[in-house]
């Protein structure tokens, strides 16, 4: 079991607050991602049992949303929005620059396990693009220098 | 429950489709209603192309191709809607041929084709591909795509029976729904988003259920193919013949694909009264028995050394009469028994029963192999015509076996070899128990351990090789068409019995014979 009793209890209590228990599945995936660092196939299988859905239905959610990963990523999840409004103000150039600064490509983790770099769909910060998200924090109105300064300050 | 005679069925409404009025049930969607009227997918019907909708699966509404123009009472103007998810109502007016409908179909086809590979020359589906058909009917010849097409995995091994080409998939989700709704196994899902979306299985879980190959039947494109038929024949070189599966008592309807004189495949053929749209994998692959290496192709009789050897038809018939005549004359019909098979057609079991009646043989029984059943289609009785054999008077075989073991029998006429198989309805019979008999005459499609004790073997036709009718477990009588010619010398049971009857000089035999 990768989902321990405490986490399982939290998930099951959230299930009770939905008219359809499976409505709590997305939230459960967030809990698992936060606590275990990823939604492994073992965790997905255990969730499918808790929610009485087919395992592949959990996989559909995990692979649909950017928030979830099937393997552990770096300590800091850095994602750059490249949707249309951010793209129009240079998000793709920014992402390229960050790739160069970190020496990794999008989707990869730095060899020291410090930063995982990803691409993000719209985060609703269109007026302040380009922007990136690190964990729960938004960093807005970025240029490459500002972004690199933020990244370098990460431990 | 129904209204008075002469009135429309309770809950029925009138809709007008392309100017023609139809009464339909009000709880249906437009596609369901037209399907129920027998107007879908037929040349003289109403043409509404569709990919994701399937009469035996839940509505998905994902392909968007079935758009038509609908005008409901009170609407100021017609609007485009998907016919699969549009409920009918009194006074609904449907236009399937308008300019707007044509433009909508063209647009949907363009989007579906934007990333579809130009694989047709190497695609198994070519020739029976809805995408190909509808691209021809409603699409535009040239692509406006300047970007490279999406590249995806071309050979995904989904499981033991089916392969997936992700590039060809149009994401109609029929296979996904089939596995969730019909088999309840839920192996397949759609992962990723947008143009990266793909059919996938859970890591470590294969598409592996007793009905798995139906997903290839319902795949409207060449994304899912059965490993059995993959690269085996071009479908336009197949003759498609309406047949039935003979693997169990359900009698599922199949379309038998024939090329070069051989059966190349079975695919499920829709019959809502028998099998819906599905067949089980075991039944689908049972066509392989038709050309199996152990098929009997010649009459066999014992030579001087006791070996079973090929003989001519006339020799075999003469030998049958030579063996049976003295038995009947000296010991009477009481020492002869007849074992029917659930594999023989109604015509053949009736001929067999008549033959036994004329001989006055009353020790008869039906040998039947039994196995696992399921809740969907597979029946426990592993023969297509057990009900037909019972209907002409062949009952349980216990009494016959009792007489046999009690030493009361000298001769046995046997259709098929289910008598011997391990899991017969009755206690299994070992071929050795037949060793003491004077005469064992076998009519069978395939070689079997009965050969050890048989004095005569007559090679008979598989259901796909003959004309005949079969009664399924619900009493539905089906008359499949002949799909292939049997090997020369392989005949119907009734034909052999007729000849033996003539050779024995039985009353009523040979009267109509001209040759």
Image: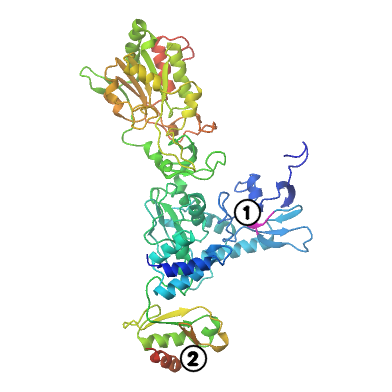
**Left or right: B368 with respect to B319?**
right
Q: Tell me the mark number nearer the camera, choosing from 2 and 1.
A: 2
Task: Please name the residue shown 36% across and 32% down the image.
Answer: B423
Residue extending farthest to the top is: B330
In the image, B213 versus A55, the foreground residue is: A55
In the image, B236 versus B375, the foreground residue is: B375
**Left or right: B12 with respect to B335?**
right
Question: Looking at the picture, how far across and down is residue B134, in whole percent?
Answer: 56, 57
What separation in Å lies between label 2 and label 1 (alpha carbons)?
A: 52 Å
B203 is within the stretch colored magenta: no
In the image, B195 versus B360, the foreground residue is: B360
From the viewer's perspective, is residue B148 above or below residue B485?
below
From the viewer's perspective, is residue B15 above or below residue B151?
above
- In terms of secondary structure, where does tag 2 sit? loop
The residue at which mark 1 appears reads as B48
User: For the magenta stretch, what is the residue range?
Assistant: B82-87
Question: Looking at the picture, how far across and down is residue B140, in whole percent?
Answer: 57, 63
Dot 2, crowdedness within 10 Å: few (<14), some or many (≥20)?
some
Asked if badge 2 and badge 1 are on a common chain, one would say: no
- In terms of secondary structure, where does tag 1 sit? loop
The residue at which mark 2 appears reads as A142
**Residue B194 in sight:** no
In the image, B418 versus B42, the foreground residue is: B418
From the viewer's perspective, is residue B474 above or below residue A22?
above
**Residue A2 in sight:** yes
Question: Looking at the picture, how far across and down is residue B315, in whole percent?
Answer: 32, 17
Quarter of the picture holding the N terminus of chain B: top right
Question: Looking at the picture, how far across and down is residue B192, in whole percent?
Answer: 47, 68
Q: Quadrant of residue B358?
A: top left
Disc 2: host chain: A
């Amino acid at each position: 079991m990768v989902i321990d009793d405490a986490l399982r209890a939290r998930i099951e209590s959230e299930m009770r607050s939905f008219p359809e228990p499976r409505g709590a599945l997305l939230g459960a995936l967030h809990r698992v991602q936060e606590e275990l660092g990823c939604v492994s196939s073992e965790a997905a299988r255990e969730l499918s049992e808790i929610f009485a859905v087919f395992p592949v239905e959990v996989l559909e959610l995990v692979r649909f949303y950017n928030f979830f990963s099937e393997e552990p990523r770096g300590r800091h999840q850095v994602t750059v929005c490249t949707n249309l409004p951010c793209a129009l103000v240079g998000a793709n150039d920014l992402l390229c620059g960050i790739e160069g600064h970190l020496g990794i490509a999008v989707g990869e983790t730095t060899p020291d396990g410090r930063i995982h770099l990803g691409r993000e769909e719209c985060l609703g910060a269109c007026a302040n693009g380009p922007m990136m998200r690190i964990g729960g924090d938004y960093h807005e109105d970025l240029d490459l220098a500002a972004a690199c300064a933020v990244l370098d300050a990460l431990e | 429950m129904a209204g008075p005679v002469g009135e429309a069925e309770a809950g029925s409404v009138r809709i007008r489709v392309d100017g023609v009025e139809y009464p339909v049930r009000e709880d249906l969607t437009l596609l369901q209603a037209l399907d129920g009227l027998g107007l879908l997918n037929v040349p003289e019907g109403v043409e509404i192309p569709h990919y994701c909708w399937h009469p035996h699966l839940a509505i998905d509404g994902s392909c968007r191709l079935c758009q038509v123009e609908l005008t409901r009472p009170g609407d100021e103007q017609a609007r485009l809607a998907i016919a699969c998810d549009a409920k009918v109502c009194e006074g609904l007016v449907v236009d399937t041929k308008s300019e707007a409908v044509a433009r909508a179909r063209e647009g949907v086809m363009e989007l579906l084709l934007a990333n579809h590979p130009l694989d047709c020359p190497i695609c198994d589906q070519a020739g029976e591909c809805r995408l190909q058909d509808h691209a021809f009917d409603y699409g535009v010849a040239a692509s406006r795509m300047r970007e490279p097409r999406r590249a995806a995995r071309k050979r995904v091994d989904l499981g033991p029976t089916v392969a997936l080409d992700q590039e060809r998939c149009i994401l109609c989700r029929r296979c996904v729904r089939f596995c969730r709704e019909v088999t309840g196994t839920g192996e397949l899902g759609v992962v990723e988003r947008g143009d990266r979306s793909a059919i996938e299985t859970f890591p470590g879980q294969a598409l592996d259920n007793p009905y798995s190959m139906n997903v290839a039947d319902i795949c409207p494109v060449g994304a899912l193919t059965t490993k059995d038929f993959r690269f085996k024949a071009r479908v336009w070189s197949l003759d498609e013949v309406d047949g039935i599966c003979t693997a169990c008592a359900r009698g599922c309807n199949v379309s038998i694909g024939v090329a070069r004189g051989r059966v190349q495949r079975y695919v499920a053929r829709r019959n809502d009264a028998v099998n819906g749209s599905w067949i089980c994998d075991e039944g689908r692959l049972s066509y392989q028995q038709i050309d199996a290496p152990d098929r009997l192709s010649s009459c066999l009789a014992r030579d001087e050394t006791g070996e079973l050897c090929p003989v001519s038809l006339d020799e075999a018939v003469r030998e049958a009469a030579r063996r049976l005549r003295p038995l009947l004359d000296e010991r009477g019909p009481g020492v002869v028994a007849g074992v029917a098979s659930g594999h023989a057609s109604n015509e053949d079991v009736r001929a067999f029963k008549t033959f036994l009646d004329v001989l006055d043989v009353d020790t008869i029984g039906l040998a039947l192999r039994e196995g696992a059943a399921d809740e969907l289609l597979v029946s426990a009785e592993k023969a297509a015509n057990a009900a037909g054999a019972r209907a002409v008077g062949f009952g349980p075989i216990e009494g016959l076996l009792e007489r046999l073991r009690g030493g009361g029998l000298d001769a046995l006429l046997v259709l098929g070899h289910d008598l011997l198989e391990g899991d017969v309805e009755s206690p299994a019979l070992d071929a050795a128990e037949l060793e003491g008999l004077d005469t064992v005459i076998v009519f069978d499609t395939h070689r079997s351990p009965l050969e050890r004790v048989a004095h005569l073997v007559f090679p008979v036709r598989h259901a796909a090789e003959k004309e005949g009718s079969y009664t399924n477990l619900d009493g539905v009588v089906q008359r499949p068409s002949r799909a292939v010619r049997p090997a020369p010398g392989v005949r119907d049971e009734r034909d052999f019995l007729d000849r033996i009857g003539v050779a024995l000089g039985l009353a009523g035999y040979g009267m109509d014979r001209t040759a």
